[in-house]
Image (cartoon, coloured by chain):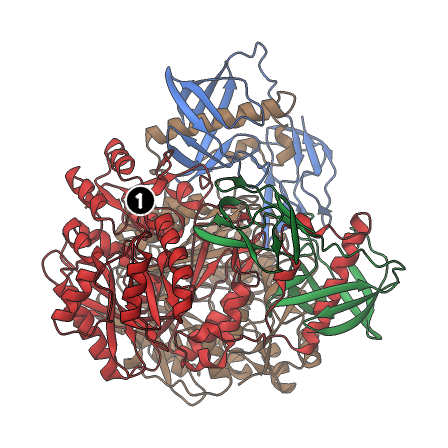
Chain colours: A red, B brown, C green, D blue
Amino acid sequence: MFQKILIANRGEIAVRVIRTCRDMGIRTVALYDDSDLGSLHVRLADECVRLASGALYRDVATIVQIARDCGADAVHPGYGFLSEHAEFAHACEDAGITFIGPDSATLAAVRNKIGTLENVSAAGFAVPRHSARPYGESETAALMDAAETLGYPLVIKSYSGGRSHGTRLVREPEHLAPLAQHAHSAALTAFGDDRLYIEEAFLPGRYVEVQVLGDRHGALVHLGERDGSIQHNHRKIIEESPAPGLSDAQRDELCGQAVAIARLLGCHSVCTVEFVLDDQGRFVFTEVKARIQVEHPVTEMRTGIDLVREQIRLAAGEPLGRTQDDIILKGCAIQARINAEDPWNHYLPSPGRLRRFRFPGGPNVRVDTYAYGGCDIPVRYDPLLAKIVAWDVDRVACLGRLRRAIADFAISGVQTNLPLIQRILDDPDFAAGTYDSEFTRRQLLNTLASSGNLRDLAVAAALAYARRSADGNGALPERASSGWHRESRRLPQ
Amino acid sequence: MFQKILIANRGEIAVRVIRTCRDMGIRTVALYDDSDLGSLHVRLADECVRLASGALYRDVATIVQIARDCGADAVHPGYGFLSEHAEFAHACEDAGITFIGPDSATLAAVRNKIGTLENVSAAGFAVPRHSARPYGESETAALMDAAETLGYPLVIKSYSGGRSHGTRLVREPEHLAPLAQHAHSAALTAFGDDRLYIEEAFLPGRYVEVQVLGDRHGALVHLGERDGSIQHNHRKIIEESPAPGLSDAQRDELCGQAVAIARLLGCHSVCTVEFVLDDQGRFVFTEVKARIQVEHPVTEMRTGIDLVREQIRLAAGEPLGRTQDDIILKGCAIQARINAEDPWNHYLPSPGRLRRFRFPGGPNVRVDTYAYGGCDIPVRYDPLLAKIVAWDVDRVACLGRLRRAIADFAISGVQTNLPLIQRILDDPDFAAGTYDSEFTRRQLLNTLASSGNLRDLAVAAALAYARRSADGNGALPERASSGWHRESRRLPQ
Amino acid sequence: MNRLSVTIDGHVFTVEIPPLNRATNEVSMIVDGQEVHVLMPEVGGPEPLDWIIVNGRPYELVIDRDLHWMRARSGLHQVEVRDLDATVARPASGDGRVKAPIPGLITRVLVAAGDHVEAGQPLLVLEAMKMENEVRAPRTGTITHLSAAAGQSVTLGALLAEIE
Amino acid sequence: MNRLSVTIDGHVFTVEIPPLNRATNEVSMIVDGQEVHVLMPEVGGPEPLDWIIVNGRPYELVIDRDLHWMRARSGLHQVEVRDLDATVARPASGDGRVKAPIPGLITRVLVAAGDHVEAGQPLLVLEAMKMENEVRAPRTGTITHLSAAAGQSVTLGALLAEIE
């Protein structure tokens, strides 16, 4: 087993990985830049190294050099950043350091997203119709032509990098040009590659994915599916397992396809095979994510398997040591992503210093985060502040538990999307499990407060007003001081 | 199902119960006195009522009246306080309010501890030799005579109330009188009844107990055993399931005896049957705890069953709805009790204001607490601040995880026994699972720090010294200001 | 007693409240004619109003400093407080200054000084937390001042433009 | 440079440290002749020294205010710091005053003024957190002053007795 692992990431996933390393008795090395020195991953690691170059967590050469210098025998890339970066994996391999994930050749193959779609299609699985090649920012006309051929609605996706930054749904032709411009720019910011490709969109559809686990000796199992259809701007907000409403036959078909595709693509380690479920009940393969996912705790709660530990074990060459029959999928797990952002003000990010940060608790509630009371939420990185996951014997009980956990999560100092998540969880369609990818377009009502509660809140507001007046000169602070536009803070009905 | 439950308790167990009530959509009413108004149970409840009488959480008449006034249809007593108080259960029954636990007749029967021992013995189970009756503080001579007859070592136990306050182990005759005096006084403080009885002690022995679950219709199952042999002053510090080192045959025998005894005593709801395992491998029944236990999360982690939810369901008259075959005991769970006390200074309690209070996290780590950063730890109540529970597929992995979780739990502002727990978990006998009830008499070494770490800590100490000097007049604060005796703060080797 | 009109999610309440100071932690007030008893425990130092107990019902709260919203267990609520005894209305402070709503990097400026803009029209793009955020015009008018430039890092509240 | 002798769990280190002030958060020092680089990030306001990074190794710490122990991930460590440059040794402050180590209720007083007591002998019993705690004599001597009485509530640090 490894003696020391460098975690080439930050935020909650770096914390997550450090914890399992420590559970296993493996030493850890964290990276930081000046803006996230105060994050928990630095405090919890055995060693830490400052990143000073402009590319920071994306700087392949520097990070490989740090791994050499500190004597790490393996690197865990987390998600995002260099996690699916074939050249990084290759550089680690060259340096004699184990990259915890698939080998660089597999990464290079699945990074070619169009080639992957064609491979999978050739093997007889459904894939979305798609452009035959990617397009750079300067190729707008060619992109327009390809879109014309493909038809609408369609999805723009970044050619490099798996996370949502370059993804845009285009419902109407007139939106293509501006959305493509944004997507080019976002993909360049996130992945250093502005190229995009386009793909048939399925509306309404459901985003379902299957967790697979494979060793370097050919053994491969699945750990059930997850549903990630509740998204905003192509970022998942809620994920759950099992995907509600699937029949046993559908679930068997889905997981069987996933294992076959993973085998076809040579996936090992911890990978996810993603599908869209269209309104005809057909599973359409879209992508493989060859790394740990943000939503992996959902699967951990259902199976009792520590996916990061498996990933480390498998990277060390250990055999999977379990067959499909050993995997028991129990109960229901739902995860919500808590972002430091303001859903009522154009999802504006909300960096700043956390004041109160009190976790919900009780049985089968888990919180993953890099933050703690008093720490600074940096402006440079993505707004994912924490994940809350609840498990229970069935979906009704699990939803009750997650609702309570969300209501109990006390955060002040920065704005979060907790109130939005409350509204999603209280929506009748979400509760019934009959939602699809169009869910977040609807108006979400606040149904939690009774009129008696509203009266009590009026008392609180009056007191807050009176205390401010008692403190100062009787005037409210100038609105401009908070930096928000009052106009944009109107709450949706 | 109940609409509103009054929680007749405080601290972490009140929080625990409120959480499950909320998960189930049941409204909750919390109680508080002036010193624990800031505790989490008050913040999380739907309603709260101040206790003003001297008896506070033990005031039967006041609490029943509060339950009536707020329209509660059930009362959850937690552990300690009125949880095994037959008169309280009876008063609730009279008021038409469900007492969440066994009925008052069962409670009255098991509260008669000597009668219970005789019942169980008559049914053919091993029980410790014991005094035939309890003794009040004025009956010292009679107690001495009984002890002479019984022989040494022996255990003094309080006749009323189950928690450890009145319990004393007496190894030698000359210690009996002073220990009995302490025990009378502690029992009076804790339970309002100074009577004690004495019982044969088994040294070395192991304290093992079996969780049982029964409905009001005769169904009864066990949820496996727990080992609670690691104690200080008869308070458990570490609890785990399964009990290490038992053979399958022993485990079957233990759990079978527990179910038979629970049935014999008419236990329903959530109860625990306690045994001593003597050095001959014999299980000797000692007591039944007819309420939720501090260590119940250990069983919850292994079974996935929410014991508080079961308790509420069963109290509402619902059937158990599971047979012994439905109960799957998976992996290993270990709990540590974090107390606000100083193990290096005669276990002196450490009340005060919490500053930092950051939970450990990651998969399968759970923290139960009533505290949060900035809250006050009251001086009036017991020092249990938090419980940490870890689960994993086997004991080695679970211990690795718990060690890490304990090291990650950041608490400042009050003193805790976290460093003591670290030493216990690192002890080779604990790691091997070969400990017994004599474990805490040994010297525990600090084995965690390398000499490189000590050098770094010397740097930290130098800096702390220099910063103090830079701040003030160059002198250290006067030692007396902290209230500790330097002499008693010597660390054990 | 000070009389306030408090609107929560569109529901209007009239609150009569006695004079307060920081040390007050128990107070009786009148809401729509009914007496209400409030406890405001001080926990962990001089924080903003963080939780209160109203007639025995505890509420943990996050209240924004402009008093336009509050978060409770029941979610986010829209708030408006008006002093019924104030003889002079507070001046509407909705001026045309556009300030940086978050610290970040200006990646694009979409308007120039002298341009006419409509309320809600994007003025510039600010990158923060790996997302591009459009800063929009708070009102319709003419850009009289523009101090933002692409490539510039700005701090929270920095003046970016003015519209008149 | 100030020279300190620091003992951690019986291991002695000599530390040379430059002058500091509150604003210092990066410093080089010499430990047993070797240079060590230290970072002291300030997090969440002016807290006591809460974590430091020594040559790239981070430590979260709780350090008692008398500097007699510290808690790190590795557990509790005994600490002693001595200023090697100080010309006058700090007076041993081990006087015979017995103060309340915790707030609580005095349930029993076991000695009387004028009694001779041995170091470590129980003087009185203080009830707190549902436990009875014995307060013991810090030194051998005679009780010259006794202000504690059974039934009395005492605050942290209250003078209970003096031994000479």
Q: Is residue A64 left or right of residue C141?
A: left
Q: Secondary structure at mark 1?
A: strand
Quarter of the image for residue A287 reads: bottom left
Q: Residue furthest left?
A: A217
- x, y percentage for residue B126? 34, 72
**Quadrant of the image containing the N terminus of chain C:** bottom right
- Residue on which disc 1 sits: A7
- x, y percentage for residue A20? 31, 51
- x, y percentage for residue B158? 53, 64
Q: Residue furthest top?
A: D87
- Circle 1 marks a residue in which chain? A
Seen at 42% across and 41% down, the residue is A43
Q: Nearer the viewer, residue B353 or A397?
A: A397
Which three-letter amino acid code belongs to the residue tagged 1? Ile
Q: Is residue B229 in view?
A: no
- x, y percentage for residue D117? 62, 32
